[in-house]
Amino acid sequence: MSVRRAAARGALVTASYDLLPQTVGNWAVSYEKDHMSQANEKDTAEGAEIRGLRAQPHELRQEHEFPKNAVALLAQEQR
């Protein structure tokens, strides 16, 4: 939404409900802060999940290679 349209809507709301423009502005700022913090929390949670999923192939590769390395080590010791 453009700034002009938002200002026009704010003016319409203040006139319709006989409010001070500052009151509507405070509500808008409060709403924006609440929703931005929720968006940031979501981004943080998604980022943590993505990092975990990216680390998963490395962990699986290590789990898969460990038995092979153990068998190779035991085979060398028996020679």
Image (cartoon, rainbow, N blue to C red):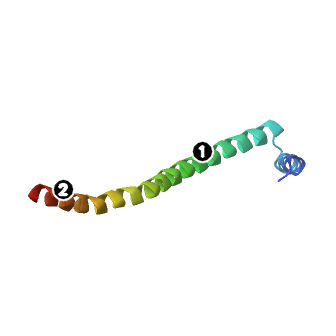
Q: Amino acid at mark 1?
A: Ser
Give the number of marks. 2
Q: Position of residue 8 (x, y in %)?
A: 89, 49
Image quadrant occupied by the C terminus: bottom left
**Front in this rendered view, residue 65 or 6:** 65
Q: Position of residue 17 (x, y in %)?
A: 81, 49
Residue at image point 65% right, 42% down: 33
The residue positioned farthest toward the top in the image shown: 22
> Which circle, 1 or 2, is nearer the viewer?
2
Image position of 3 with respect to 64: above or below: above
Residue at image point 82% right, 53% down: 1
Q: Earlier in the sequence, mark 1 or mark 2?
A: 1
Q: Which residue is labeled 1 in the image?
A: 37
- On screen, residue 26 versus residue 11, left or right, reads left
- SS for callout 1: helix
Q: Which residue is labeled 2 in the image?
A: 73
**Front in this rendered view, residue 34 or 42:** 42
Tag 1: Cα neighbours inside 10 Å, few (<14), some, or many (≥20)? Answer: few
Residue 57 occupies quadrant = bottom left
- On screen, residue 9 versus residue 60, left or right, reads right
Q: Amino acid at mark 2?
A: Leu
